[in-house]
Image (tube, rainbow, N blue to C red):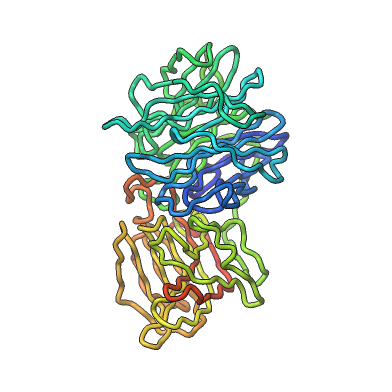
Amino acid sequence: MIENPVIRGFNPDPSIIRIDDVYYIATSTFEWFPGVNIYSSTDLVNWKLHSRPLNKKALLDLTGVPDGGGVWAPCLSYDGKKAYLVYTVVKERGAMMQTDNYLIETDDINGEWSERVYLNSIGFDPSLFHDADGRKYLISLENHYEKNKRFNGLYIEEYDSVEKKLVGGRRLLYQSPTGELVEGSHLYKKDGYYYLLKAQGGTGVRHSAQMARSKQLFGPWEEDESILLHARDDESLPLQKAGHADIIDTPWGIYLVHLASRSLGGICGRETCLQKVCWEDGWLRLANGGNKPFVNVEAPGKRKMVEEELYDFKKGSLSNDFQFLREDISDKIFFSEKGLHLKGGSGLNSHFDQSLAARRIDEENTEIEALITFDADNDRQLAGIVYIYDTKHWHYLYMTRSCGEMVAKLLSCDNGSILYYDEKVKIKETALLSAKVENGNISFYVDGKLLKDKVDASILSDEHIHLGFTGAMAGFNCIDCEKREKSAIIEYFKYKRTAEA
């Protein structure tokens, strides 16, 4: 059985393909580098991180992007010979949204991807449709800049895969008859109909997956009278915000992949789920009935649980579980028999030059731990562990030098305002820093002794943050706001999932 979410912790906007007997799901990574998580599975139940194809600046430049900007809603597609990835880089989230759309492709999903092709900048959530005659079409919503009119419907334009450019001019494909925002759309063809699967209602609690169909590629469209999937108006459901979906045929039936969140106010953000679906009277329906997301769904595999992950940096490598905030910091990292050496960068509020490596939080209750050696010269040099949502929301347990002594202290940031704590402890140049999230609160420890407890974890949730729709991360960093020369040595980083108390 699938136990949803099937890919846990900050993995929204899933798009799915099948190549031979392997399934691949791409999810959004926003301001974290390298970009786009691609997961693989052979049984739909157990998924592993396969790759992050946007792994160089020529493919993804996130320098200075806003919090919650960067890569939105990548679409993974396959035409039987090549895999294609189209994606948006959001560089401005205000009224004048800047949304650049690109395409890369590969003959071998296990190998290298092509250089990127610029497509357009009309809006976000692009998808690529491969028609039966071999022609390809790009679909995305169009941003609008008139007062009180942010979005202007879905548009379509043909993509010439030989010339590697859009051709023929774009035309309006679809507008919602209800006026709801329509995004995250995918186009399919079956039994003489074109089917449009679309996300409606925004990505919060009104989110949904809905369908329309047409005998012609460009419409007119007939609306499905039933919402395919949603969790609207029922906060008791274990899966909330269900929507933004894609479908895949398998030997075990048809499955719909979609985003959802396990809780409102939790720190795992939007995650990836699977539902079994079937065709009834020309429309997709949940195989289990109704239109609410199910936690347990029939599938051929059995989930394998891992309670603890230990990243031993003395082995000389950094797991691809970790990402960097906006910029590639691999040139700031080297390894020795002591562990990972990380050169200091900017502070946690900065959109530039941070030295931070973090992994996804995939359960509400977790523990993190790192053994760090750091010989700070002054209080402008810091190194430690962090729970972080974005540059305005984080909790930071760190080492620094204050009044000539090495100390460990705690800082938090909520909506850009720094929260100072009086607690501090003298330490040596090597210290064990740890933190535990339990039932919405965080406790911080230094060398096994409690420094501060009952620190609010909910400031790392989507619901706490205006227009928040990503998820929290946990990791380590080094700051040097003096000369960018001081390094910290991280011997290991431990991540442990714990049961609810």
Residue 189: x, y in percent?
58, 19
Residue farthest to the bottom, as pictured: 404
Q: How many marks?
A: 0
Q: Which residue is painted at 66% across and 42% down in the image?
A: 114
- Comparing 281 with 288, the one in front is 281
Residue 15: x, y in percent?
56, 36
Q: Is residue 38 visible?
A: yes
Q: Is residue 229 visible?
A: no
> Based on the displayed image, in which of its 4 quarters is residue 364 positioned?
bottom left
> Based on the displayed image, in which of its 4 quarters is residue 161 positioned?
top right
Q: Which residue is painted at 58% across and 56% down in the image?
A: 321
Quadrant (top left/top right/bottom left/bottom right) for the C terminus: bottom left
- The vertical placement of 452 against 375, above or below, is above
Residue 355: x, y in percent?
50, 65
- The vertical placement of 432 against 52, above or below, is below
- The vertical placement of 13 against 325, above or below, is above
- Comparing 48 with 153, the one in front is 153
- Comparing 465 with 442, the one in front is 465
Residue farthest to the left, as pictured: 147
> Based on the displayed image, in which of its 4 quarters is residue 255 positioned?
top right
Q: Is residue 303 left or right of residue 197?
A: right
Quadrant (top left/top right/bottom left/bottom right) for the N terminus: top right
Residue 33: x, y in percent?
53, 53
Q: Is residue 5 left or right of residue 67?
A: right
Q: Which residue is painted at 60% across and 71% down in the image?
A: 340
